[in-house]
Amino acid sequence: MLIAIASDNKKVAAHFGHCQAFECFYIKDGEVGEWKTIPNPGHQPGFLPNFLHEQGVKTIIAGGMGQSAANLFNNHGIEVVSGASGPIYKVATDYVTGNLSTGGSFCEEHNH
């Protein structure tokens, strides 16, 4: 399974669409394996959920995201985890072990 974490400087980004990159961790047998960095190709409405789906992502973790984006991820069968914070590897490990604490932050408006 592949999980993606919206990242700024190897920490969870506050808003997934404006992050520097997506840190994509391979999860196998309940453990965090190797990961790859995918630079953010740009924030355009509706683009990133499709893009990450094409990369094989099954879960997206971010500090916050708009409800429309969350709905698009869900339409692709991608789990959305919002309200996370901290260093990406710890967040990935906490997610896999079921210890990830989140605040469930969905943005109501965007000021682009």
Image (cartoon, rainbow, N blue to C red):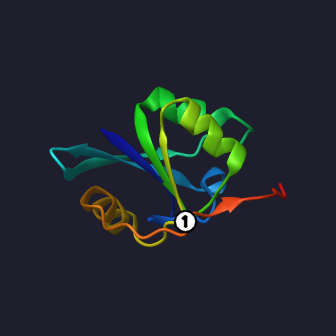
| 98 on left or right of 8 | left
The location of residue 21, given as percent across then percent down, is: 52, 51
Identify the residue at the far right of this view.
Answer: 111
State how many labels appear: 1
Q: Residue furthest left?
A: 29
Q: Residues within 10 Å of mark 1 (few under 14, many from 20)?
A: many
Q: Residue at x 53, y 29 (%)?
A: 76
Q: Residue at x 84, y 58 (%)?
A: 111
Camera sees residue 42: no
Residue 110 coordinates in the image, percent (x, y):
81, 56
The amino acid sitting under disc 1 is Gly
- In the rendered view, tell whether residue 91 sits above or below residue 47: below
Query: In this view, which residue lies farthest toward the top?
Result: 54
- Of residues 74 and 5, the one drawn nearer to the viewer in this rendering: 74
Task: State whether residue 14 appears in this view.
Answer: yes
Looking at the image, residue 66 sits to the left or right of residue 85; the answer is right
Q: Can you give x and y, in whole percent of width and height, for residue 75 in the image? A: 57, 31
Whether 63 is drawn above or below 74: the answer is below
Residue visible at 42% across and 70% down?
A: 101
Q: Is residue 6 left or right of residue 41?
A: left
- Quadrant of the image occupied by residue 90: bottom left
**Quadrant placement of the N terminus:** top left
Q: Quadrant of residue 91?
A: bottom left
Q: Position of residue 104 (x, y in %)?
A: 57, 63
SS at badge 1: loop
In the rendered view, tell whether residue 3 sits above or below residue 9.
above
Q: Quadrant of the C terminus?
A: bottom right
Horizontal side, residue 39 vs residue 26: left or right: right
In this view, the residue in front, 57 or 81, is: 81
Residue marked by disc 1: 83
Residue for point 72% across, 59% down: 107
